[in-house]
């Protein structure tokens, strides 16, 4: 049986950027059922990805800050990106 990695274990194994990408991908999937790779490549997504990677580097245990960053990605945000 495969066990889930904690965020700290995932960061240690994959680094902050890949962890940030995975968290954002899961957020997009929970909203739309799509992958972040299905969205157009935009500076807005890149900015959130960078902000989250920086947060994970600075303090990966600050769940409120991580949630705040991820909550920037909502249905309105995704629609703005898709329907430009």
Image (cartoon, rainbow, N blue to C red):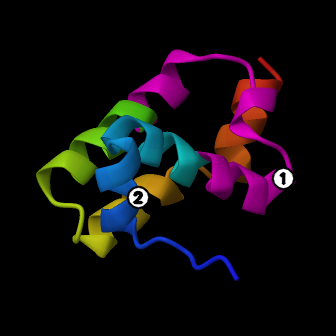
Numbered tag placed on residue 32 in the rendering:
1
Quadrant showing the C terminus: top right
Q: Residue at x 86, y 54 (%)?
A: 33
Tag 1 secondary structure: helix
Q: CA distance from mark 1 to mark 2?
A: 24 Å
| Image quadrant where residue 20 sits | top left
Question: Quick one: label 2, few (<14), some, or many (20+) residues within 10 Å?
Answer: some
Tag 2 secondary structure: helix
> Which sits in the foreground, 83 or 20?
20
Q: Is residue 34 magenta?
A: yes
Where residue 1 appears, x then y in whole percent? 70, 83
Q: From the image, give the main secondary structure of the stretch colored magenta.
A: helix
Q: Residue at x 41, y 58 (%)?
A: 10
Q: Earlier in the sequence, mark 1 or mark 2?
A: 2
- Vertical placement of residue 35 versus 43, above or below: below
Numbered tag placed on residue 10 in the rendering:
2
- Judged left or right of residue 19, residue 61 is left
> Which sits in the foreground, 84 or 41?
41
Question: Quick one: label 1, few (<14), some, or many (20+) residues within 10 Å?
Answer: few
- Judged left or right of residue 3, residue 47 is left
Where residue 78 appears, x then y in whole percent? 71, 39
Where residue 31 appears, x then y in whole percent? 77, 58
Q: Is residue 64 magenta?
A: no
- Vertical placement of residue 11 versus 34, above or below: below
Q: Residue at x 40, y 53 (%)?
A: 69
Q: Residue at x 23, y 40 (%)?
A: 54
- Vertical placement of residue 5 versus 46, above or below: below
The stretch of residues the image draws in magenta is 25-48
| Image quadrant where residue 77 sits | top right
């Amino acid at each position: 049986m495969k066990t889930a990695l904690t965020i700290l274990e995932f960061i240690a194994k994959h680094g902050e950027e890949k962890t940030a990408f995975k968290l954002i991908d899961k957020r997009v999937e929970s909203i739309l059922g799509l992958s972040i790779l299905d969205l157009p490549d935009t500076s807005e997504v890149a900015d959130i990805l960078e902000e989250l990677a920086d947060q994970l580097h600075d303090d990966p245990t600050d769940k409120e800050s991580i949630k705040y960053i991820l909550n920037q990605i909502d249905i309105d945000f995704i629609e703005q990106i898709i329907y430009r």
